[in-house]
Image (spheres, rainbow, N blue to C red):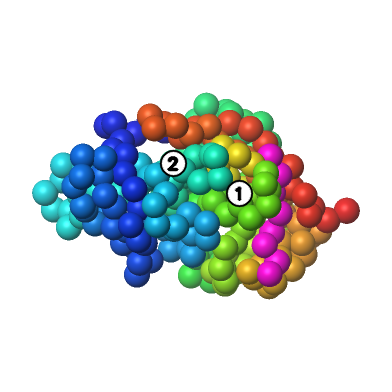
Amino acid sequence: MEFPSPLLRGRLVQRYKRFFADVVLDDGAAITAHCPNPGKMLGLNTPGLTCWLSKSDDPKRKLAHTLELVEADGGVVGVNTLHPNRLVAEALAAEAIPEVAGYAVHRREVKYGENSRVDFLLESPDRPRCWLEIKNVHLMREPGLAEFPDCVAARSTKHLRELAEMVRQDDRAVALFVVQRTDCDRFATAADCDPKFHAALQEVAAEGVEVLVYGCEIDQSRVKLTRPILWRDRPA
């Protein structure tokens, strides 16, 4: 996924009300940007961090700038939670995720479960359907270890239960964690942030929900899904 125009560099002043970030650009301009991330952004909302923003020319937008990347802990982190679905869509089209390659049809936002929509439903006439949920990962507290979630994630826990139900119906179900960091090679659930999610992931994995974790290459021109990452607390 390439950014449509060069990103602008600045320094984070503050992130507040979940979806707003005040930034001073390198040219001295003080702006308020949209922060497309509902999580706590632990370690990524410290004033003074170098950040990168996109700018839209759409006159209908209230905020022209969007917070895209933050430099932290010596790495680059993608904070836009809208990107993982786009990254996975590109990877599916390129058959770049071997575990879910070979499906003829990739449908998005298909209704399932209790008032939910799965991110992707993969279909082919010669195999079971595959229900694919995507989760964005940007938390790192231990060097090299990506964690999810960074706050209570009741909706994500609900999605896990719904994936398990698809397995009971003899379909495939996959939870794919997209690590938008360049400095992680391992993944674990953040049990202290949400013990219910931690327990649910362990349970549904034992029931047959497949768990995949993939990392990204990130720079100021693009973000690309590239490599599998080890799930450290995978159940035996």
In the foreground, 200 or 63: 63
Kindly identify the residue that appears in the image at 77 percent across and 64 percent down. 203
Q: Within 10 angstroms of label 2, few (less than 14), some, or many (20 or more) residues?
A: some
Left or right side of 36 for 174: right
Residue 113 x, y percent position in the rendering: 56, 66
Kindly identify the residue that appears in the image at 51 percent across and 46 percent down. 72
Q: Quadrant of the N terminus?
A: top left
Left or right side of 179 for 20: left
Residue 199, quarter of picture: bottom right
Badge 1 marks a residue whose secondary structure is: strand
Q: Which residues are magenta?
A: 185-192
Residue 202, quarter of picture: bottom right
Residue 94 x, y percent position in the rendering: 52, 26
Residue 20, quarter of picture: bottom left
Left or right side of 47 for 101: right
- Spatial CA distance of label 1 from label 2 is 13 Å
- Residue behind mark 1: 177
Q: Does residue 8 belong to the magenta stretch?
A: no
Residue 168 x, y percent position in the rendering: 73, 61
Q: Amino acid at mark 2?
A: Arg
Disc number for residue 86: 2
- Whether 154 is drawn above or below 19: the answer is below
Q: Amino acid at mark 1?
A: Phe
Kindly identify the residue that appears in the image at 55 percent across and 40 percent down. 74
In the foreground, 223 or 208: 223
Kindly identify the residue that appears in the image at 21 percent across and 53 percent down. 31
In the foreground, 217 or 117: 217
Q: Does residue 186 belong to the magenta stretch?
A: yes
- Whether 66 is drawn above or below 155: the answer is above
